[in-house]
Image (tube, grey):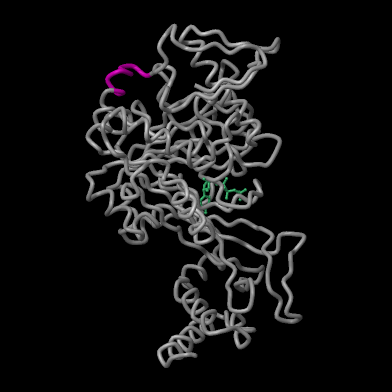
Amino acid sequence: MRTESMTERLDAAVAILQSHDQGHLTDGLESVGTSEVQAFIEQVESIDFEELQTLVTKGATNDGIPEALEPAPVIPRHPKDEETFRSAGEQLIRQGEIAAFTVAGGQGTRLGWNGPKGTYPATPITGKPLFRVFAEQLNAIDQRYGIETPWYLMTSPLNDAATHAFFRDNNYFGRSPESMLLFPQGVMPAVDDEGRILLEAPGVIAVSPDGHGGSLRALARSGALDHAADRGVKHLSYFQVDNPTVHAIDPLFIGLHATHPASSGEMSSKMVPKIAAGEKVGVFCSVGDRTRVIEYSDLPAKHATATTEDGSLRFIAGSIAIHILAVDFIDRLTTAGSETAMPFHLARKKVPFWDPKNGETVNPPEPNGTKFEMFVFDALEFVDQGLVYETDRVEEFAPIKNADGGDSAKSSGQLQTERAARWMEVAGSKVARNEDGTVNGQIEILASTALSAADLEAGSCPELAPGSQLVF
Ligand code: UTP
């Protein structure tokens, strides 16, 4: 039964919709129950119609691609004074100033997995889910430094409950639940080509997560920034849920971010050299004194294909979505006025919708609507000196995006094995390889055994016999 206050709220919601030419959203509302009406009112109240109106009329709120693009300067993989920076990073970790931050709010449409992406089996032999891979790394870090690393994990309203349940069912993989904070990101409505918001069902507005860039305002809204500040955390080590080889907490990268003269300590990023001009990764560029990532689809061809004297790509710094962000910086970005608002990007997508004419759900064969997303790398625009550090592709980039083919669990598993093999070979161990150089077998090294090649003791590693599997 509708209460008086609910009727008032519904009237107010309808008035808001009408004043923004979105009155059609009440189509079919008379056929749904009280709790659905309640949920509908909450959806309407949570939408920023002014923001949406601007997006619909003006398009993307980023400024387009600047003319004066230069390649961003990059700190090499083994920088001068490497050990000093690593020690500085270790000191910050030991002092409890570093937390892990995983973005896991994506819909994982390409993977087509029935559940949060973090529950997907990722390792080549034991098929550990991604969430376990990161939890075990953090457990090893905690053990090593005698700390309890806070872990912030962004979900979305679509996968939040399933993610909570997964961690609960697995006893948080041995981590203390108090040190973890799972929180859903924001959503944005999808609109049709006339700027009319789409309905998913009667009384249900079609929404989708607001992009990984939405993570910054979600950190603020959820109380995660306060949680971090209360614990003395100064920096968040940001990574995506679909990269099992990421170094969740990397002392050298942290040391560079916090103490290198080329960094303002606000936001730093890792890059890998692009392997081809057409590789579909964003590229780190400089625009005036600012660092920016330009998406592959936006990088003008003359830049994408330009080469240097030695024949390598001029714009070579590919973004692998690994960053460190200062808590103070995120706080500034999310509490200040609109001058630091993150821009939205528009993507045309197939958005299933409910058609009030015949009361049916339509699954369009072609893109029919627009979704709005923020990208985390756009925060670089507000950074004084954004440091970019080179890492090695095999060492920490083995993404799982697709069910098969490139960037699948299979290709990622091969990279995980290759990395493990390299670590073993550095330690003087024998690894069976095929004639083409690929590893003849599969390897998984536990995070409790080693977090990097340097942790494997020379002479103490097992060997990989041809065609075998090795977990140690
Ligand atoms: P992707 O851009 O690969 O998207 O996200 P996705 O949703 O995982 O997969 P597709 O495109 O639907 O197939 C890169 C990372 O950013 C996170 C994802 O969870 C992944 O870790 N992400 C993306 C969010 O947390 N929220 C978003 O709104 C979008």
Membership of 163 in magenta stretch:
no
Residue 254 horizontal/vertical position (percent)? 33, 31
Please say if 308 is above or below 64: above
Quadrant of the rendered image containing residue 313:
top right
Question: What secondary structure do most residues of the magenta stretch adopt?
Answer: helix
Looking at the picture, how far across and down is residue 162, in whole percent? 52, 56
Residues 61 and 117: in front is 117
Residue furthest out toward the bottom: 4
In x, y percent, where is residue 398?
Answer: 56, 32
> Is 316 above or below relative to 186?
above
Q: Is residue 187 left or right of residue 351?
A: left
Say which of 132 and 324 sits in front: 132
Tell me if 300 is positioned left or right of 293 in this view. Answer: right
The location of residue 384, given as percent across then percent down, is 32, 41
Q: Is residue 416 above or below residue 207?
A: above
User: Residue at (35%, 26%) from the top-left corner?
Assistant: 252
Residue ID at (75%, 64%):
364
Q: How many marks?
A: 0
Tell me if residue 22 can be seen: yes
Q: Is residue 260 visible?
A: no
Depicted 73 relative to depicted 228: above or below: above
Extent of the magenta region: 79-86
In the depicted view, which residue is nearer to us: 396 or 182? 182
Which residue is depicted at the point 57% across and 79% down? Answer: 22
